Image (cartoon, rainbow, N blue to C red):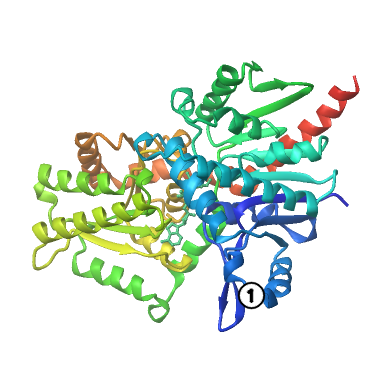
Amino acid sequence: MSKTIIISNRLPVQLQISDGGLTAIPSVGGLATGMKSVHSGGESLWIGWSGLTDEDTPESLESEIDRALSEHGCAKVKLTAKDVDGFYFGFSNRTIWPLFHYFLEYTEFELDFWNVYKSVNQKFADAIIAHSDENDTIWVHDYQLMLVPQMVREKRPNTSIGFFLHIPFPSYEIFRTMPWREEVLTGLLGSDLIGFHTYDYERHFLSSVRRLLGLDVSFNDVYLDHRVIKVDSFPMGIDYKKFKDAALEHNKNKEDQRSDLQIKLDNHKASAPDTKLILSIDRLDYSKGIAKRINAFEYFLNKYPEYKEKVRLIILAVPSRSNVPQYQLLKREIDELVGRINGELSTVNWTPIWYFYRSLPFENLIDLYTSSDIAWLTPLRDGMNLVAKEYIATRIDKTGVLILSEMAGSAYEMNEALLINPNNFEQQADTLKRAITMPKEEQMARNMFLQNRLERYNVEVWANEFMNSLNRKSEGDETFVSQ
Ligand code: ADQ
């Protein structure tokens, strides 16, 4: 029986060794939840890195690891600590991530990183070949694995291969600065279908293919040798029902079932009922514009001092890539900014910013989403931004205001949000005021449209549309080849 093979850097479960035994922890985040509907039963296999390097893994545990992973429908790619350094912390997060998010000043073009990236992509491709046959459908995910489609194609010329990029694809002017640009494009073009979150990313990719490889491009088809590669946009949705149901459940919770965080939030509301809670949630990443957002908050309080003691900004930053120097610097910058602003503006009754630097359990995310009057998300660049969608899905009574950066992929689908340019402090200060004073009826009218769209175009629909398009594509190709 043919199956679907999903490939991503990380698996939906991460293994940890504690007291000599193994623990499997479910991965949080968009990709893991998004692919759940495809990764069901015995019809699919998910291949990725387990989170343990070879050096961390005693040989005696190898077969136990394989067994634990296979219980979750997964198989591992073995990586050494040097692989993880050069491939993940190196080329993926010091070259591709900053370049594709337009942070040229942070982008490092290191030949050593590139060589490890190539060899690790080959390890992933080899694992796919070992675990699949010609009839299986392969779905490769994200910027860490852009060479894998072509590497698999060389061994399996007729296999159906899809690729989805979760981050932006930058404009040609940015992309062409990379020394290995042709190899990356050729790697991706090993696919039959290449998916992006937005039409803009799709156009940028096609423009690079045309100008750098000189290939024929017609609408969204690329012609390469005897193959036609389809390029399309598939904006990723969320598990809408999961967030809505969690919020409904949360609202039913009795006094004694509340989390410590919810008790803190409720006490805050009781003691200052007129104070608006403004929420910001992101991985701690320079692309998310957290430092700028804090500066914009200070600007707002100076421009509209009447809102001092009437608003509170909650910042939840999830630790991320802390081995990369830029992330360490950013962490320090945010610590200092929050400290300075709280030091300068706090009063006996009021601290302007509550700052949490940690990953929170799902229940606490729901506490924050449901208790906040405003979600303020200002990435400088973001492939999609699922937090914006999750916030809206939890607003059961349809109140709440979403302020969202135009630079997030989700802004294309969320027109009823208040869209802002994160570099424009004047506009952000005015938009915050507008959000604080927005009548309930207007909030509800906007959120009704947003919720309807999110419910219809949920993550399951996203995954199915991609897979259907890939399947249609391979059926069509058979006709093309046989003519
Ligand atoms: P990310 O950059 O990680 O994803 P995002 O899309 O917002 O950004 O997803 C973050 C996920 O982490 C959300 O599902 C959120 O619930 C979860 N999360 C956030 N804070 C958390 C916390 N403190 N504790 C636990 N979980 C938390 C990348 C791209 C995005 C793209 C996604 C999916 O950068 O642009 O939207 O992939 O394609």
Residue sitting at x 51%, y 39%: 111
For this orientation, the residue located farthest to the bottom is 19
* Total labels drawn: 1
- The secondary structure type at the circle numbered 1 is loop
Q: Specify the quadrant of the image occupied by residue 37.
A: bottom right
Left or right of residue 20: residue 428: left
Mark 1, Cα crowd under 10 Å, few <14 / some 14-19 / many 20+, is few
* Residue 468 pos. (x, y %): 73, 38
Residue sitting at x 35%, y 52%: 325
Q: Specify the quadrant of the image occupied by residue 483.
A: top right
Look at the numbered disc 1 and say if its residue's Cβ is closer than 8 Å to ligand 1: no
Pick the residue in front: 222 or 300.
Answer: 222
* Residue 296 pos. (x, y %): 21, 44
Kind of residue sitting beneath label 1 = Pro
For this orientation, the residue located farthest to the right is 482
Answer whether residue 442 is visible to the viewer in this image: yes
Indicate whether 39 appears above or below 105: below
* Residue 364 pos. (x, y %): 41, 67
Indicate whether 179 appears above or below 134: above
Q: Specify the quadrant of the image occupied by residue 480.
A: top right
Residue sitting at x 84%, y 48%: 133
Residue sitting at x 70%, y 72%: 62
Q: Which residue is mark 1?
A: 58
Pick the residue in front: 433 or 274.
Answer: 433
Indicate whether 143 appears above or below 349: above
* Residue 455 pos. (x, y %): 56, 47
Answer whether residue 233 is visible to the viewer in this image: no
For this orientation, the residue located farthest to the front is 112
Left or right of residue 146: residue 372: left
